[in-house]
Image (spheres, rainbow, N blue to C red):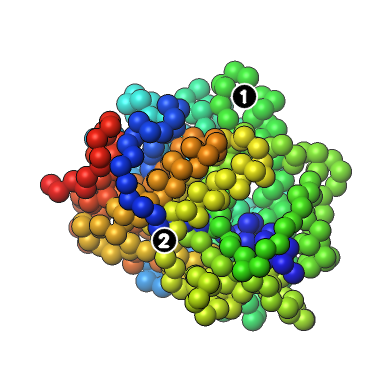
Amino acid sequence: MAAAAAFFCALLFISVQHGVLGGYTRNDFPADFVFGAATSAYQYEGAAAEDGRGASIWDTFTHAGKMKDKSTGDVASDGYHKYKGDVKLMTETGLEAYRFSISWSRLIPSGRGAVNQQGLKYYNNIIDELTKRGFQVHVMLYHLDLPQALEDEYAGWLSPRIVEDFTAYADVCFREFGDRVSHWTILAEPNVAALGGYDTGEFAPGRCSDPFGVTKCTVGNSSVEPYVAAHNMILTHATVVRLYREKYQTLQKGIVGINTPLRICKQLKDTRISRTDDYPQVMKKTIGSRLPSFSKVQTELVKGTLDFIGVNHYFSLYVSDLPLAKGVRDFIADRSVSCRASKTDPSSGQQAPTQSMGDPHGLQLMLQHLKESYGDLPIYVQENGKLKLDLLPVFSGKASSNDSLDDTDRVDYIKGYIEGVLNATRNGVNARGYFAWSFVDMFELLSGYQTRYGLYRVDFNDAALPRRAKRSARWYRDFLKSKRQPLQIAQQ
């Protein structure tokens, strides 16, 4: 099962590492490389019941008390009302790009049908504000927040009907915003959405089955549903890319891609796997009839549906093979690997370790691996900036989670990872951008408001939700303004 270890880690995980903190500057990067920061709709916007927004599966999930701190994203960082001030802070920080997601249920409250004009106005206003200030605008069409109406009607991602409805939603976005948006990411972390939402039950819609859920789920099948959901996500991505290329790309001249969390999984014993145009044979053999299949038409549809690759990367793992468990298995058991944070650490079993050191060289290796595997496709590091060591056992993680303004550990972390990206570009990787996660403190999908990862601190105990720059924001600002002098951490 060595091949399984390599494949499942490449499919599932994210990665990153600690490195030498050094004397590179902004000018050491290619001219077309952009630095930015990111947020997502449910985590940032708030205004959950305002101006015609429909409910998403995360509204239902959090209002059912599923978060450990019993929190919701009803207000979150109040980006719905505070976006102008936040864009001003982005300008002051020197950001060159901003990545945000659109709330499907704010734009089309029922998931299909009439467009909510207030939602349309909100996103037009954000995009106009960004373009007016010279930002490269990156839009994520879906960041795990399916309209609840479609979950109620046909179980969302478990039904092939989702392909048509999502494509119609994407069509609205391309039509309304595509004259100003040049970078479109169709789906965020589809492997995480499938695993957390349909295997462990820790993400909305919270489906799982015993004994695999981390909490008691009332509905779901952890052995089958993660694969069905992921399969429909792949087909949705491919269909939307075809729509954009056939209807919009020639005129709008934008590019489309997908986002995935990737860890570099360092095997304790070297093995190699071959690439295929379908699910790898090791998956078919291991999963059997639980794995959906592609028709010949679908296989052709899926091929070549990336103009770029979006990567979320936080830490590295060492993995070794385990015997394939007998009986009923979920995705985690299908992986059949043992994980550890270093060669000398004890195994954490099939779950990710609860602690891991930073590994910027791991990000460099991951980017180089993508170039070797997929050629010269542009790559954007769409999330990085905290060491993920959090609650979800399979793709867990987050560090630098304290509420301090003096986040020196995070400064060192970001420095190391940016250097890892720089080293990869010097080795021929076509890396085009780096986005810190996140721009401001937000509602976190695994931990609510218990962990904070923004460059700017948000005081959630103050109804005004004021923003204050952390040391990491000041360092990022100074780096982005740097020319050829050594970098120093700002002290003011």
Position of residue 65 in the picture relative to residue 294 (left or right): left
Residue designated by label 2 = 358
Mark 2 or 1: the one toward you: 2
Query: Against 359, is 252 above or below?
Result: above
Instruction: Tell which circle, 2 or 1, labels the residue nearer the N-terminal end.
Output: 1
Amino acid tagged 2: Gly
Query: Against 472, is 375 above or below?
Result: above
- Camera-side residue of 112 and 404: 404
- Callout count: 2
Which residue occupies 48% across, 37% down?
Answer: 426
Q: Which residue occupies the extreme right position in the image?
A: 296
- How many other residues sit within 10 Å of disc 2, few (<14), some (14-19) or many (≥20)? many
Which residue occupies 71% across, 70% down?
Answer: 334
Please state the horizontal and vertical placement of residue 189, each as a whole percent of the image. Answer: 56, 52
Q: Secondary structure at mark 1?
A: helix
Query: Against 157, is 338 above or below?
Result: below
Q: In the image, which disc is placed on residue 249?
A: 1
Amino acid tagged 1: Gln
Where residue 26 sits, quadrant-wise, is top left
Q: Secondary structure at mark 2?
A: loop
Please state the horizontal and vertical placement of residue 354, each as a whole percent of the image. Answer: 46, 73
- Camera-side residue of 74 and 446: 446
Where residue 256 sits, quadrant-wise, is top right
| Image quadrant containing the N terminus | bottom right
Please state the horizontal and vertical placement of residue 446, each as a whole percent of the image. Answer: 45, 65
Q: Which residue occupies the extreme left position in the image?
A: 492
- How many other residues sit within 10 Å of disc 1, few (<14), some (14-19) or many (≥20)? some
Spatial separation of the CA atoms under disc 2 and disc 1:
39 Å
Q: In the image, which disc is placed on residue 36?
A: none
Q: Which residue occupies the extreme top position in the image?
A: 251
Which residue occupies 81% across, 43% down?
Answer: 299
